[in-house]
Image (cartoon, rainbow, N blue to C red):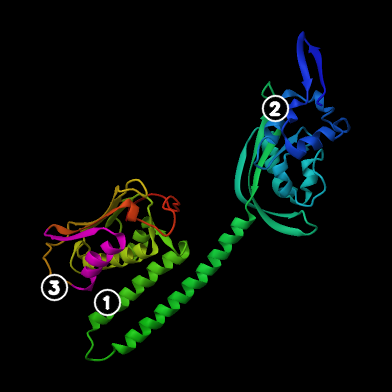
Amino acid sequence: MASISVKTIRGVELLESVHFLDGGGSMADAIRAYDWSSTALGPLEHWPSSLKIGVGMMLSSKFPKCIVWGPELITIHNDAFLPILGEKPPALGRPFSEVWHEAWDEIGSIAQRAFAGEATFIEDFPLVINRHGYPEKAHFTFCYSPIRDEAGVVRGMIDTVIETTGTVEARRQASLLNGELEHRIKNTLAVVAAIVSQTLRGDETDPAARSILLERIQALAQAQSLLTRASATEASVVDVVLEATAPFRTSEGRFHIGGPPIMLSSKQSLSLSLALHELATNAVKYGALSNAAGKVRIEWVAGRPDTEDAFVFRWIEEDGPVVRTPARQGFGSRIIQMVLPHDFGGEAVLSHDPLGIRFELRANMCQIGGEQPSSDHHSQPASEKS
């Protein structure tokens, strides 16, 4: 049972108790049993209230936490911190700088900033540590926060930490695999392009048709490359638009692009990329990009994810030559008006307005994405003029 006594300081009765350890798990028992009189902290019952409160809160947390107290950097931690330590000698009551001596050159200055009153938050911080009898590279996301006493003086710091080694390694492996996949896809499409070029070579072949086909293969390669660089199953509409229009954004002020970071499925990303390539190619030949004054606005709006709210994507050409309705529907028009709305589960309208081409795609938000959670956004909202 915890010992309790009463003492008087300046006429105020203070309760000396170790009830702040109640419910603190195995480390609370270890803290009770430790001979704190052999350290600068002194007997457990006489600890300052700021330390008691901090330790009590730490022990009650399921998140890995460690308190570092006083000039001696005395270490006190909770149960959840034990896996971080691995097979290191017990850290309780030892200087934090001694516990992590192999990494102190990297983290010592961060601890100093905390004792100077400055909190620090770092994600996926790489460290070479020794906790299993050999050096290993590990990654941690952590925050060093100062702990102040009743007078506002910094007496210690709290280290809130989680190991992210597995996550960082998984991302690295995925990046390597996607890089190899991107390389192989590009090689395959390069072979296809070479076969097409060889097959269509000759006097009887229309050079323009040959060029258009090769450009479409290249557009498909760029769209697939975007997917492999992202997650191979989804891509942000922001990235799709910027990637697809990059070859056509050759001068400032021709494109005005803006919209929220909505994630598309791989099928939607590919069809939108091809549709944008067809729209841009047509604009260069006949539309707003065929003169010096024309502009293209690409904009989209979105509602709540996974609802019937509307997703609307628009391509609007302005200040180009007078637009005339084509006599026949080509391959590009079929991609824009049939394939794209099918992949989005919506509808599309392509209008040959005399003032400029107008294209609008409409779908419900519940149709957008679908291969990954739509809330997992990787990109920032787009707002670009180029």
**What residue is disc 1 on?**
212
Q: On the rendered image, what quadrant is the C terminus found in?
A: bottom left
3D distance between C-alphas at marks 3 and 2: 78 Å
Outermost residue, bottom direction?
Answer: 203
In front here: 104 or 67?
A: 67
Residue 72 seen in render: no
Answer few, some or many: residues within 10 Å of disc 3's Cα (few below 14, many 20 plus, some between 14 and 19). Answer: few
3D distance between C-alphas at marks 2 and 1: 72 Å
Residue 228: image x %, image y %? 46, 66
The magenta-colored residue range is 330-354
In front here: 144 or 65?
A: 65
Up/down of 354 relative to 210, above or below: above
Kindly identify the residue that appears in the image at 76 percent across and 24 percent down.
48
Residue 73: image x %, image y %? 77, 37
Up/down of 100 relative to 371, above or below: above
**What residue is disc 3 on?**
328
Tell me which label, 2 or 1, sits earlier in the chain: 2
Kindly identify the residue that appears in the image at 67 percent across and 36 percent down.
114
